[in-house]
Structure formats: structure tokens, C-alpha cells
């Protein structure tokens, strides 16, 4: 068995080439956004897998995927370093486990194709990336289609969503592997790019007469829950909230409130007094008995509770631990992000909050903004609001990737997005994903900004993934058709 497995594996030189090509494909992700490097690297990997025997191709796809995910998700070690004395020992294992684990999707993408292997692998990658957003609660981070977010090509997401962008990416890369068709890939890319430029040149509705205050307290994760610093952070939030001139809505980021408002009801009056008549959306933890939620609470001008939302798409191992109670008892393992017991309780699901004159808003707490499917199945909002604590992601890649994916939600839905981070990327995006206002990274301050207007519902907002699924089915029939041969 061991001899057979060794015979099926490619030599280490080809494995190294596959991993390097995967790493090159990751250069298209934020903050670099080097799509011009990512696309030929992906084409090289598709050609390498397509020319290999089937079983060798699976190995090459696995190592290529590992190179891609380990490069794109290098920020994954950061949460383990917040409390390095307790959790730092896990950091060296986290990145390779995540990288090789997610690369199994790419290995599976290479398996089914006995013929038309390069085309089949390219198509399989699109299907694998779609599946990655759903399997085991989903993790659609650093999708191949995300390499276009900072370009006009991203405007196509209003029609085909992130999966459509991924299909475009892998088909362009496959076209580059076919010498006589490489020019066709360039023509298609130029056409989509030009359509994006035309879309961005179209007039936008005037902004609504609503002024928002985005509060960025910049609390370091190591200090965020330090009881000795809680009052300092709270005073900073109140001072930013009380600044003149008055606004219509003040927004605090995820878990910004260092106290439990359920145990200290006087806090609501203090916040309302500082706001001077404005409503305040507060990111906080709330509790009932021994259960806790990661929540957003909207307070009225008099401190009353106008609306609330509980995060429902929780981060595995970050906000909850599978079999958490048992693991906490046996090994003292608890969720990283939660300060209440072993994790948070999931909320009821996506919601749209009616804030009266401020319009209808769909809240997204942190990680929820990377899931396009979570914006469907509810009534259409007037705008999107993401509150987040990106201190968990470090300062190099994670916060920028997180913000880029949230930005794509604005384009897909044709809705403005307001993003408020404890530290990270705090910004306002219009309904085509353009930044209309932003704060400096890693600075304790606030920003007053106008709320952009929404656009009509996009085709993707109405139809979701259905058109792309039909396209994938058609492409799969081409790849599996026995008399059809597509070779690199």
C-alpha cells in the first residue's frame, strides 16, 4: 500500500512548483490585489494538474491549494498570539492545518475528471469554492473571484455574485493555458473590465439627508477586556459620541461596550445623554442566565431600546466550540472571542431592523459579512451595517481581506454599506462599492459621514446563485461529454 501511494505521488519538485503556483494565485487577494500575478499563476496550476495523470493531479491540486490558503490566510495565527502564554503553542499548527484542510476542496476538484482534465479542474475549482461557502457552516474567505474586488470587474457581482466572479476567474485562467485561445481570455477580460467602467460612470441617486457617526475606539485585543482599562475605553466611546455637531445615528463597533448593560441599566441613560438626541447602535455582549450573545442594541434618544439583533453565524472555535462544555471541563479549552463561558449562543437568523427615519437596515456582525447567502431570505433593506472587531486579524492582511469581502456585499445587493471597526477598516461604501468616507487604520477617532442612497435590487439580489448554477451545469456537461476533448 505504501509503495502504491508513493508511486501515485508526483516528485517533490513538481509538488514545490504546485505550492509556489498556489502561493502566486494568493497574491490577488487584499491587500495586494495583484490579479495580474494571480491569474497566470492559477493558469499554471490548472495546466500542471491537467497534464498530470489523474491521481498525481489530485496530489498537485492539494499542494497547490495548500500554498494558496497558507499564503492568503496567514493572519490565522494572530488570534493565538493575543494571549501567547496560553494559546501561542497552537499558532505553528493552525496555519498548515487550515491550509491543507481547505486544500482538500481543491484536491476534490481534480478528482472526477478522467478526460478534459485541465478544463475539468478549472470547473471543479469553481464548484469547490462555492461548496466552501456552505460545508460545515461555510468559510468563503479568499475565494478565487475575490481577486477582482478592487477593480471594475467587481461590478459584475451585481449580476453573478461571488461565484460568478470565480467562474470568470477560472475560465480566464484556463483560456491562458490554451495558446491559441489566450487572446480570447484577454478580450473577455477587457470586455468585462470595460462594462465595469461604464457601470461606475453611471449617475448615482443623491445621498439621503442622514448623517452617521462611525466610532473607532482602537482598543487593542490584549487590553480590550482588561477590567483596569474598561472605564478608559468607555469614556473614550462617550467622548466621541458627545462630540459636536449632533448627528442622526452614532455607531459603536462589535462588543465595544466593556460592561454588561443587562447588569448596569444606567449605562443606557449615560449613552443617550452623550448622544444628545441621536440614536446609538451599540455593539455589546448580552446575557441571560448562563447564556451570552454577540449583539447590537439600538438605543433611542431617551435611552430606550429601539431595536436589537443577535449574531447568528458564529465563528467556529472563535465564538463557539463544538462540544464546548465538555472540552472546557476536560481541557479548559474555550472560544477565543467570547468572554462569557465557552462561547456565544446563535441568534435567530438574518433580520432587517426598521429604524424609522433612518430607514431599514440589515445588521451584519463581523464574520457574517463574508456570507452572501445571509443577505437573502429577508425583506430588502435600505442599507447594510457591519460592526466588527478586526483586532483579532492583526494588521497585515486579515482586516483588509475582511473589509474587501464586505465591500463586495454592497456591489452584489446594490446597497450602501457602513462598516465600523474597533480597529481595522472603518469606512462608508456606496451601492457600487466605492469608498465615500473612511478613517485611518489603527487610530482612535470618529467620522461623520452621509449615508449613500440605495440602488434598485440587482439581478443577483433577486436571483441569487441560480443563473450561475445553470451555467456550471452546462459547463460540466461539456467537461464530461466523452467525445469532447479540451486540452491545454
Image: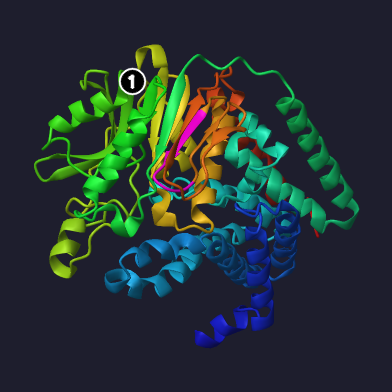
**Is residue 397 among what the camera can see?**
yes
Q: Foreground: 246 or 78? A: 246
In the rendered image, the residue lying farthest to the left is: 289
Is residue 128 shown in magenta? no
Residue reaching furthest to the bottom: 3
Q: Is residue 194 left or right of residue 55?
A: right
- Where in the figure is residue 112, as x and y percent of width and height? 60, 58
Q: Residue drawn at (59%, 57%), measured in percent from left and top?
A: 109
Q: Which element type, helix, strand or loop, lies under badge 1?
A: loop
The kind of secondary structure the magenta stretch mainly shows is strand
Residue 113, visible in the rendered structure: no
Provide residue 118's location: percent of width, then percent of height. Answer: 72, 59
Please tell me which residue lies in front, 472 or 98. 98
- Residue 354: which quarter of the image? top left
Which residues, given as a range, are shown in magenta? 417-424
Where residue 283 sits in the image (x, y, percent)?
31, 37
108, 71: nearer the viewer: 71
User: How is colour applied across the structure in the image?
Assistant: rainbow
The residue under the point 50% across, 86% down is: 2
Q: Which residue is mark 1?
A: 278
**Is the C terminus in the top left, top right, bottom left or bottom right quadrant?**
bottom right
Amino acid at each position: 500500500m505504501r509503495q502504491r501511494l508513493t508511486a501515485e505521488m508526483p516528485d517533490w519538485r513538481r509538488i514545490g512548483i504546485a505550492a509556489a503556483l498556489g502561493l502566486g494565485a494568493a497574491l490577488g487577494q487584499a491587500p495586494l490585489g495583484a490579479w495580474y500575478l494571480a491569474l497566470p499563476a492559477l493558469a499554471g496550476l490548472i495546466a500542471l494538474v491537467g497534464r498530470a495523470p489523474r491521481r498525481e493531479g489530485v496530489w498537485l491540486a492539494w499542494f497547490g491549494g495548500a500554498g494558496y490558503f497558507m499564503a492568503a490566510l496567514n493572519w490565522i495565527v494572530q488570534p493565538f498570539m493575543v494571549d501567547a502564554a496560553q494559546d501561542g503553542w497552537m499558532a505553528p499548527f493552525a496555519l498548515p492545518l487550515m491550509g491543507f484542510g481547505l486544500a482538500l476542496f481543491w484536491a476534490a476538484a481534480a478528482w472526477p475528471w478522467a478526460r478534459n482534465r485541465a478544463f475539468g479542474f478549472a470547473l471543479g475549482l469553481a464548484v469547490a469554492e462555492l461548496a466552501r461557502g456552505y460545508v460545515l457552516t461555510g468559510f468563503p474567505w479568499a475565494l478565487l473571484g475575490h481577486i477582482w474586488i478592487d477593480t471594475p470587474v467587481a461590478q459584475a457581482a451585481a449580476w453573478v455574485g461571488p461565484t460568478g466572479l470565480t467562474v470568470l476567474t477560472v475560465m480566464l485562467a484556463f483560456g491562458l493555458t490554451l495558446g491559441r485561445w489566450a487572446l480570447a481570455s484577454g478580450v473577455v477580460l477587457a470586455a468585462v473590465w470595460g462594462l465595469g467602467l461604464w457601470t461606475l460612470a453611471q449617475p448615482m441617486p443623491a445621498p439621503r439627508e442622514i448623517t452617521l457617526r462611525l466610532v473607532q475606539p482602537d482598543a487593542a485585543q490584549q487590553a480590550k477586556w482588561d477590567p483596569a482599562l474598561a472605564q478608559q475605553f468607555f469614556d473614550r466611546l462617550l467622548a466621541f459620541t458627545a462630540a459636536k455637531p449632533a448627528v442622526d445615528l452614532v455607531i459603536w463597533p462589535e462588543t465595544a461596550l466593556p460592561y454588561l448593560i443587562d447588569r448596569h441599566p444606567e449605562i443606557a441613560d449615560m449613552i443617550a445623554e452623550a448622544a444628545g438626541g441621536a440614536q446609538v447602535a451599540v455593539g455589546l455582549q448580552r446575557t441571560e442566565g448562563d447564556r451570552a450573545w454577540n449583539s447590537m442594541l439600538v438605543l433611542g434618544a431617551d435611552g430606550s431600546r429601539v431595536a436589537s439583533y443577535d449574531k447568528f453565524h458564529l465563528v467556529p472555535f472563535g465564538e463557539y466550540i463544538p462540544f464546548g462544555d465538555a472540552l472546557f471541563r476536560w481541557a479548559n479549552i474555550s472560544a477565543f472571542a467570547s468572554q462569557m463561558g465557552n462561547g456565544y449562543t446563535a441568534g435567530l437568523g438574518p433580520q432587517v431592523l426598521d429604524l424609522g427615519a433612518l430607514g431599514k437596515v440589515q445588521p451584519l456582525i463581523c464574520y457574517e459579512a463574508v456570507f452572501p447567502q445571509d443577505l437573502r431570505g429577508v425583506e430588502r433593506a435600505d442599507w447594510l451595517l457591519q460592526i466588527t472587531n478586526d483586532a483579532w486579524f492583526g494588521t497585515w492582511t486579515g482586516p483588509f481581506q475582511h473589509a474587501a469581502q464586505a465591500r463586495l456585499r454592497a456591489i452584489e445587493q446594490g446597497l450602501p454599506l457602513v462598516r465600523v471597526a474597533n480597529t481595522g477598516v472603518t469606512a462608508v461604501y456606496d451601492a457600487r462599492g466605492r469608498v465615500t468616507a473612511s478613517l485611518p487604520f489603527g487610530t482612535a477617532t470618529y467620522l461623520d459621514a452621509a449615508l449613500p442612497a440605495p440602488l434598485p435590487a440587482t439581478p443577483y439580489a433577486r436571483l441569487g446563485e441560480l443563473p450561475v448554477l445553470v451555467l456550471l451545469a452546462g459547463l460540466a456537461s461539456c467537461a464530461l461529454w466523452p467525445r469532447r476533448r479540451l486540452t491545454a
